[in-house]
């Protein structure tokens, strides 16, 4: 299934760094999300070299990804249609993950 | 325990004004905060100030103040804002003049000191390691992110309206808390909690259901009439986030978590001028309809360094778009992109960077993020490129326009544009090098 079915999130930017949250709708899905949505899998979504740090907030059943190099040029110089990378949260939510046990 | 009511009147310069008017009128607020300054906005404002020394503040300052001042003064609600942008003093003078025009009595304070252009030269830029001075004539602005103490000082001086330039966004909310509750500047826990409240409110509707709806999964009632948030904050810095009854949107655990994690990087170390805020143990509890209790904010000693946004002229961006529809639309779009690339290469153009996107196919998500989409009924080709030279960037737009008669079949709806790019670099200065002062203007 897609991560989108069990989690929500938002992307923001600072310079060339994208910050993307992934938040479980239901506490029961949290272990699956924590296990499956790794820094490596998020890094693999990008068609350029990025470095990804994952922060885990178990009390909120949430992950926070800090992705350096995701937004070349940053918002002021970027030639991208979505210069802020706001849509990147949905690129992560599009990730295929294993079914609930 | 005493509780302070602080509302968010805007989360960016272009935000709606009606929800702020509703808060001013019916929010029973002690403070209404307008956050209107993005990273690049201040560099553009500096350019406006260079062109006219009386300008450089937010272009909607008058419109916003005209809409809320009578209610705020009537209800004893004090206003804090960064609408001063590159020229807080001119903004304060304009606000006082506006109040006089409206027959209102007002004490306005400008918080000064964030403009560090005169001493940024030797500081090295994070991006390049070179000193800012190496930018030469391209250097247009340098503004340090200052903290909340100047705002608290202005409030202590009796200001009804406090106008800052580049104060950090959450500091706009921390200032009133410092002033009202007398928190010490080394009470890291309370400072961290104040920053937490500010961070939750600083993007206005983002915590009250804006930028949240995903139909079927996250349904948000009446987005068209969304209400802006307010916080009820107690003396220990714990808070309830809520909004006015009868307004659209929602305040929930979900909206609060999304906003908590928005653009903060490491949740345990959210770097701010006054404190390193720690959101890693924060919890949210829904205590009633559109009421969420916030607990667990903390903080650590500040670094003593202030981040500086350095603005510089960074060349030109040109762009052009054209649409193709019907059978083979994507193939004709790709051919058109190839023609533009070939033409520009043949001219030996000096574009630093260029990209061609087929909107609807490959323009927004990273190419490897998922399987390629099915062929669409229509595409819009967008070509964008940048160059230090205006004419080179302009040539790109010309080539897209020429596709009308010289490109593939059936192209239509050309639009082109050219704009100067203001780049933003970062540097750091010791806080001692950035003294803050308050200047009061009476109306």
Image (cartoon, coloured by chain):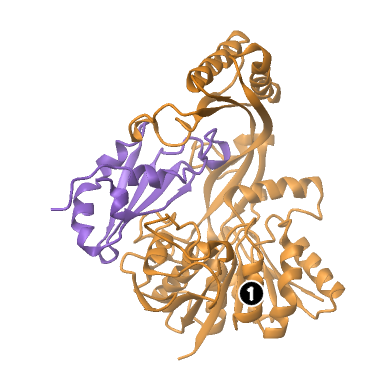
Chain colours: A purple, B orange
Residue under mark 1: which chain is it in? Answer: B
Q: Residue at the spot x=60%, y=11% of the render?
A: B343
Could you say which is closer to the camera, residue B316 or residue B376? B376
Q: Quadrant of the N terminus of chain B?
A: bottom left
Q: Report which quarter residue B411 is drawn in.
A: top right
Above or below for A90 versus B20: above
Could you say which is closer to the camera, residue B273 or residue A79? A79
Q: Residue furthest bottom?
A: B1
Q: Quadrant of the C terminus of chain B?
A: bottom right
Give the secondary structure at mark 1.
helix
Whole-percent x, y for residue B104 in the image: 81, 79
Crowd band around label 1 with a 10 angstrom C-alpha radius: few (<14), some (14–19), many (20+): some
User: Relative to residue B312, is residue B238 drawn left or right?
Assistant: left
Q: Residue at the spot x=69%, y=79% of the render?
A: B72
Whole-percent x, y for residue B415 in the image: 67, 30
Whole-percent x, y for residue B157 in the image: 68, 80
Above or below for B241 versus A74: below
Q: Residue furthest top?
A: B346
Above or below for B38 versus B73: above
Q: Is residue B183 visible?
A: yes
Q: Residue furthest left?
A: A101
Q: Is residue B159 visible?
A: no
Q: Name the residue beneath numbered marker 1.
A: B22
Could you say which is closer to the camera, residue B388 or residue B139? B388
Across the whole image, how many numbered discs are drawn on residues? 1
Q: Residue at the spot x=52%, y=17% of the render?
A: B332
Whole-percent x, y for residue B95 in the image: 78, 68
């Amino acid at each position: 299934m897609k991560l989108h079915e069990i989690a929500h999130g938002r992307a923001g930017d600072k310079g060339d760094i994208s910050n993307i949250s992934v938040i479980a709708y239901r506490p029961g899905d949290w272990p699956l999300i924590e296990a499956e949505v790794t820094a490596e899998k998020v890094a693999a979504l990008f068609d350029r070299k990025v470095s990804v740090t994952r922060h885990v907030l178990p009390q909120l059943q949430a992950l926070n990804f800090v992705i350096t190099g995701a937004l070349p040029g940053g918002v002021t110089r970027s030639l991208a249609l979505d210069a802020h990378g706001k849509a990147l949260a949905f690129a992560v939510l599009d990730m295929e993950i294993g079914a609930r046990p | 325990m005493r509780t302070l009511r602080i509302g968010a009147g805007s989360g960016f310069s272009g935000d709606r004004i009606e929800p702020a008017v509703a808060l001013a009128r019916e929010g029973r607020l002690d403070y209404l905060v307008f956050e209107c300054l993005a990273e690049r906005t201040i560099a553009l404002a500096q350019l406006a100030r260079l062109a006219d020394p009386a300008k450089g503040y937010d272009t909607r300052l008058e419109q916003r103040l005209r809409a809320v001042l009578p209610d705020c003064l009537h209800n004893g609600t004090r206003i804090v804002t960064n609408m001063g942008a590159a020229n807080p003093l001119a903004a304060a003078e304009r606000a006082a003049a506006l109040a006089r025009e409206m027959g209102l009595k007002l004490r306005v304070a400008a918080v000064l000191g964030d403009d560090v252009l005169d001493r940024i030269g030797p500081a090295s830029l994070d991006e390049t390691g070179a000193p800012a001075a190496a930018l030469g004539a391209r250097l247009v602005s340098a503004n340090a992110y200052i903290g909340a103490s100047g705002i608290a000082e202005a409030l202590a001086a009796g200001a009804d309206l406090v106008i800052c330039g580049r104060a950090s966004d959450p500091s706009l909310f921390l200032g009133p808390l410092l002033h009202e509750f007398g928190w010490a500047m080394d009470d890291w826990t309370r400072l961290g909690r104040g920053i937490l409240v500010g961070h939750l409110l600083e993007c206005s509707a983002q915590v009250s259901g804006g930028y949240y709806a995903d139909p079927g999964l996250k349904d948000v009632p009446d987005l068209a009439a969304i209400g802006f948030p307010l916080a009820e904050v107690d003396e220990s810095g714990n808070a309830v986030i809520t909004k006015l009854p009868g307004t659209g949107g929602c305040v929930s655990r979900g909206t609060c978590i999304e906003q908590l994690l928005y653009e903060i990087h490491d949740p345990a170390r959210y770097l701010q001028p006054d404190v390193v805020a720690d959101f890693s143990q924060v919890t949210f509890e829904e205590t009633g309809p559109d009421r969420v209790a916030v607990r667990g904010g903390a903080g650590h000693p500040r670094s003593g360094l202030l981040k500086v946004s350095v603005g510089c002229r960074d060349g030109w961006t040109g762009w052009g778009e054209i649409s193709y529809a019907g059978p083979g639309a994507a193939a004709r779009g790709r051919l058109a992109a190839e023609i533009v690339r070939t033409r520009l290469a043949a001219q030996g153009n000096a574009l630093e960077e260029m990209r061609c996107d087929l909107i609807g196919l490959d323009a927004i998500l990273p190419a490897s993020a998922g399987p390629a989409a099915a062929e669409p009924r229509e595409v819009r080709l967008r070509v964008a490129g940048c160059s230090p030279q205006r004419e080179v960037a302009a040539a790109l737009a010309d080539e897209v326009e020429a596709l009308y008669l010289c490109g593939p079949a059936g192209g239509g709806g050309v639009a082109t544009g050219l704009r100067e790019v203001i780049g933003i670099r970062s540097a750091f200065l010791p806080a001692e090098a950035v003294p803050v002062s308050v200047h009061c203007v009476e109306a």
